[in-house]
Amino acid sequence: MLAIFLGLAIVTGVVSWQILSSVTEEQANTPRATAVPPAYIWEAGEYLSAVFVPDGRLAVASSYQTTILSFPDNQPLTFFPAGGYLAVSPDSLWLAVGQRGTVRIYDLASGKLRAYLVCWLPPEGWIEMWLAFSPDGRTLALTEANPAHGPEVQLWDVANQRQLWSVRIDDPAITVARQLAFSPDGRYIAVTTLPGGSLAD
């Protein structure tokens, strides 16, 4: 049985920088805040989501399209006709694109649509979704930042296109389940939550 670890956190964004390999042991053992400029900045439109493919390519999604780019030279390689919020399976087989209560799962190599999951009723507007594949790539976990249905986590069998499990976080102070991640052995999911009755800007 898959267990869930729930952590209370207000998370408004994630920024990724190039990791520096020249950190000394003394620096690694000394906690400190360091301002590091981003390694790459693209002014190429409004993206909702970005995720690296395990082979080093980069997937970026607007509200209407997902593009696979070579990295770091930013050359478009493949286009998918759906945009939204992204996850890529660890084996690079699947690309999941979540939008408005649904998830489309594409074969990353061929570009063909392999699954269409209806997870929630479509909200009136765009609402953030978070998706994560299990380490074996067979299960997709997802949440949607929609107070209308509360803090819920769903698990889906990717190959068979069926929902395996759904859990609501039973805490009146928590209104939304947000980012989530599987543990390396696939036995646990960590989920961040948002209290207070409204979404963070």
Image (cartoon, rainbow, N blue to C red):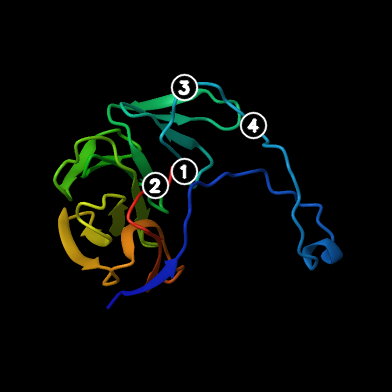
Residue 88: mark in rendering: 2
Q: Give the Cα separation between the discs numbered 2 and 1.
A: 6 Å
Residue 40: mark in rendering: 4
Q: Position of residue 23 (x, y in %)?
A: 81, 56
Q: Give the Cα separation between the discs numbered 4 and 1.
A: 17 Å
Residue beneath the point at 37% across and 48% down: 199
Residue beneath the point at 23% across and 54% down: 158
Sequence order check, earlier mark of 4 and 2: 4
Residue 45: mark in rendering: 3
Q: Give the Cα separation between the discs numbered 3 and 1.
A: 21 Å
Crowdedness near tag 2: few (<14), some (14–19) or many (≥20) residues, C-alpha within 10 Å: many
Element type at mark 2: strand
Whether the residues at callouts 2 and 3 have beta carbons within 8 Å, the answer is no
Q: Position of residue 196 (x, y in %)?
A: 37, 58
132 or 107, nearer to the observer: 132
Residue 53: mark in rendering: 1
- Please indicate whether residue 126 sits to the left or right of residue 135 in the image: left
The image shows a total of numbered marks equal to 4
Report the amino acid beneath label 4: Tyr
- Indicate the quadrant containing the N terminus: top left, top right, bottom left or bottom right: bottom left
Q: Quadrant of residue 38?
A: top right
Residue beneath the point at 48% across and 53% down: 11
Report the amino acid beneath label 3: Gly
Q: Give the Cα separation between the discs numbered 3 and 4.
A: 15 Å
Whether the residues at callouts 2 and 1 have beta carbons within 8 Å, the answer is yes
Report the amino acid beneath label 2: Val
Crowdedness near tag 1: few (<14), some (14–19) or many (≥20) residues, C-alpha within 10 Å: many
Q: Give the Cα separation between the discs numbered 2 and 3.
A: 22 Å
Sequence order check, earlier mark of 2 and 1: 1
